[in-house]
């Protein structure tokens, strides 16, 4: 009943671990798979080691969390060792980033045989200059990177888009035209900030960071809804999903599957089983036979 498929990748259920949460080691990815996720997405990594920003890198705010980790990672050559130790309990998607089409393509080529798909992070709102959202805000640059990676690999290529643009549909169409096999909507919102009123200093060392959690769900849901109306490739919905009701909203808006991130910080990896059990009961109550029957229903009504 919960089985679904995206880019010819079969999943036992429609839930995925979102990039950036518990995805920096094979052991953490395996742990999430054992706790019921239908697929896992790694933490974003690039061509070279990156220390990211100094602590503090996260701060809780009303409705979510602001983070400015700065894409810290050990680099692709080291991360390959982690990918090789993944138990393949569920499909694995590698989240990668870079500052040019060549850099994206080189990373993709190195790991093609170790993962089931690639998620191109062109949307991080707190990345160093030349990476992240500075790419994803430009439809032409986004398209160039997609074309380059598609030429370099034979596995599915997914693009994760930023909501921090005037028209996300324009970026989505550019990615689709360039050959993207699917889209992930959305990355964190912002950048935003929080100030310590005792010291009068910004709390994050980078001052600004991306907002994630329940507060961004209405924005993410609207982005999925808008993009679903204009593209033919599948969508993975992410942003503030904390229970099965949130997941169903995203599926109704047009998402073929959903990703969970910030909620794991509060509920642990068992949230995947909790969400899937809730979806299954809802489907039984509403007499749905498959996830596909539910996708995009909000548009038909």
Image: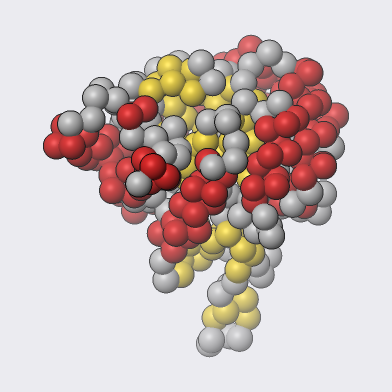
Quarter-of-image position of residue 20 = top right
**Residue at image coords 68%, 13%:** 154
**Rendered view: 261 above or below 118:** below
**Residue at image coords 33%, 35%:** 294
Residue 251: x and y in percent read: 39, 40
**Residue at image coords 51%, 16%:** 8
Q: Is residue 239 left or right of residue 69?
A: left
**Residue lying farthest left?**
285
Q: Is residue 246 left or right of residue 229?
A: left
**Residue at image coords 53%, 41%:** 228
Residue 10: x and y in percent read: 43, 17
Residue 218 appears in view: yes
Q: Is residue 270 left or right of residue 263?
A: left
Residue 85: x and y in percent read: 52, 18
Say which of 122 and 83 sits in front: 122
Residue 74 appears in view: no
Residue 239: x and y in percent read: 47, 51
Quarter-of-image position of residue 172 = top right
Say which of 216 and 166 sits in front: 166
Image quadrant where one finds the N terminus? top left
């Amino acid at each position: 009943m919960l089985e679904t498929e995206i880019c010819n990748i079969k999943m036992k259920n429609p839930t995925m671990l979102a990039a950036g949460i518990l995805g920096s080691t094979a052991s953490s990815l395996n742990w999430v798979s054992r706790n019921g996720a239908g697929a896992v997405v790694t933490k974003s990594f690039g061509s070279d080691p990156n220390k990211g920003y100094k602590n503090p890198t996260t701060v809780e705010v009303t409705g979510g969390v602001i983070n400015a980790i700065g894409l810290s990672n050990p680099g692709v050559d080291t991360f390959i060792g982690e990918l090789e130790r993944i138990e393949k309990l569920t499909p694995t998607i590698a989240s990668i980033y870079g500052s040019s089409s060549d850099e994206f393509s080189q990373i993709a080529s190195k790991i093609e045989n170790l993962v089931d798909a690639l998620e191109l992070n062109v949307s991080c709102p707190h990345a160093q200059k030349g990476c992240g959202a500075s790419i994803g805000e430009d439809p032409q640059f986004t398209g160039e990177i997609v074309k380059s990676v598609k030429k370099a690999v034979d596995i599915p290529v997914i693009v994760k888009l930023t909501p921090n643009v005037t028209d996300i549909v324009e970026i989505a169409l550019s990615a689709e035209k360039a050959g993207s096999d699917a889209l992930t909507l959305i990355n964190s919102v912002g950048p935003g900030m929080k100030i310590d009123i005792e010291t009068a200093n910004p709390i994050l060392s980078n001052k600004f960071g991306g907002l994630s959690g329940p507060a961004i769900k209405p924005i993410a849901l609207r982005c999925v809804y808008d993009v679903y109306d204009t593209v033919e490739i599948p969508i993975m919905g992410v942003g503030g999903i904390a229970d099965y009701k949130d997941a169903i909203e995203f599926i109704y808006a047009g998402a073929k599957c959903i990703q969970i991130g910030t909620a794991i910080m509060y509920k642990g990896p068992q949230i995947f089983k909790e969400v899937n059990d809730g979806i299954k009961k809802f489907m039984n109550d509403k007499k749905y036979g498959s996830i596909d029957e539910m996708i995009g229903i909000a548009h038909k009504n």
